[in-house]
Image: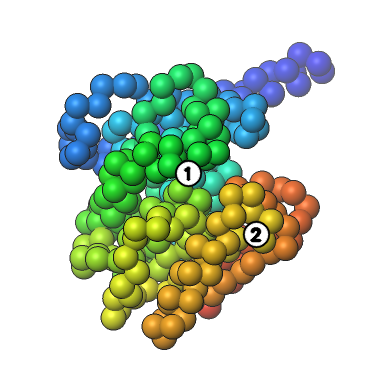
Amino acid sequence: MHIRLKLVVTSLLLLQVFRASSQQVIQLYQGAAPGSENWNWQEKDYFSPIFNTEIVYNVVHPSMAVFKPDSMPSNGTAVVICPGGGFITLSINSEGNDVAKWLTKRGVTCFVLRYRLVHALTDDPVKEMMSGLSDPKKFDSMTSKVIPLGISDARNAIAWVRAHAGDYGIDKNKIGIVGFSAGGTMAESTVFEYTPENRPDFVGPIYAYVPPQQKLDVPKDAPPMFLAAASDDQLHLVPSSLLLYNTWQGAGKSVELHLYARGGHGFGMRVQHLNSDTWIDRFGDWLGQLGYLKK
């Protein structure tokens, strides 16, 4: 009986490895990404004991992992997901893959984006990021050149999904983007100065950072926006969410904001047994209200 149990467990682990290895990954550009042609470092990942999660860093060649609905038919909606990590790392699970898995159970096709990041100089990019955050001038110097590249990746990701919508059963008018923290910067930036090809149909900046130099000119056909953050955010990014809310609301555009008393920064899909754990349910309610969860 004990041997049989071991065989079952081993089979399940092999199945999980097979599924992970068979995950479709799309290279966003053919060849080197424009603006970073001379980057020659290697993308890496590791488990960060500080963040207690898997971390990706040194992204040179932007890519997207595809998550298709498996437990129910596709409803035609697609979401590009941008994990956060201070523009130096990506919290690939709680702000990426886990979000995709939740949405696919609602019939949504997801694309988890690995956008270009600041080059980490050590094997502990989280420590580098924390050091940068403690010095605003240093942080701005580290990230100012890479943020526009990441935003370009996010816009191109939307355009790619729209151009290949037919291959995935996606409605070209039901393509949105969600991002967390630095990934929220990627998401919210796509709703300014877009083209018909890369315009998101809805956007979800979650505890996003809005760079001080960013222009906030609301387009006439601005898409609906969903915002969520926690009042005890250690990086004090609530004002960014309020700025986006007031900007959208002042322009008469559709916007919904959820501010939780507790949750901290980076709550993502983490289970903390707090009200902020339910932000994803509210996001699902919002998508349903807009008709994006209907076939």
- Horizontally, residue 168 falls left or right of residue 194, namely right
Q: Secondary structure at mark 1?
A: helix
Q: Amino acid at mark 2?
A: Ala
Asked whether residue 161 is in view, the answer is: no
Question: Which disc, if any, is residue 230?
Answer: 2
Instruction: Pinpoint residue 83: horizontal percent, then vertical percent.
Output: 48, 45
Identified at 54% across, 75% down, the residue is: 256
Asked where in the image residue 216 lies, by quadrant, the reply is bottom left
Viewer-closest of 130 and 172: 130
Q: How is the image coloured?
A: rainbow
Above or below 60: residue 29: below
Crowdedness of circle 1 by 10 Å Cα count: few (<14), some, many (20+)? few
Above or below 64: residue 36: above
First-in-chain label (2 vs 1): 1
Crowdedness of circle 2 by 10 Å Cα count: few (<14), some, many (20+)? many
Instruction: Pinpoint residue 72: horizontal percent, then vertical percent.
Output: 52, 58
Viewer-closest of 215 and 151: 215
Q: Secondary structure at mark 2?
A: strand
- Horizontally, residue 79 falls left or right of residue 70, namely left
Above or below 111: residue 1: above
Q: Separation of disc 2 and disc 1 at Cα? A: 21 Å
Q: Quadrant of the C terminus?
A: bottom left
Identified at 73% across, 17% down, the residue is: 6
Above or below 184: residue 133: above
Q: Amino acid at mark 1?
A: Pro
Instruction: Give the residue pinned by disc 1.
Output: 136
Instruction: Pinpoint residue 174: horizontal percent, then vertical percent.
Output: 36, 67
Residue lying at the far top of the rendered structure: 3
Residue lying at the far bottom of the rendered structure: 252
- Horizontally, residue 13 falls left or right of residue 274, namely left
Asked whether residue 41 is in view, the answer is: yes
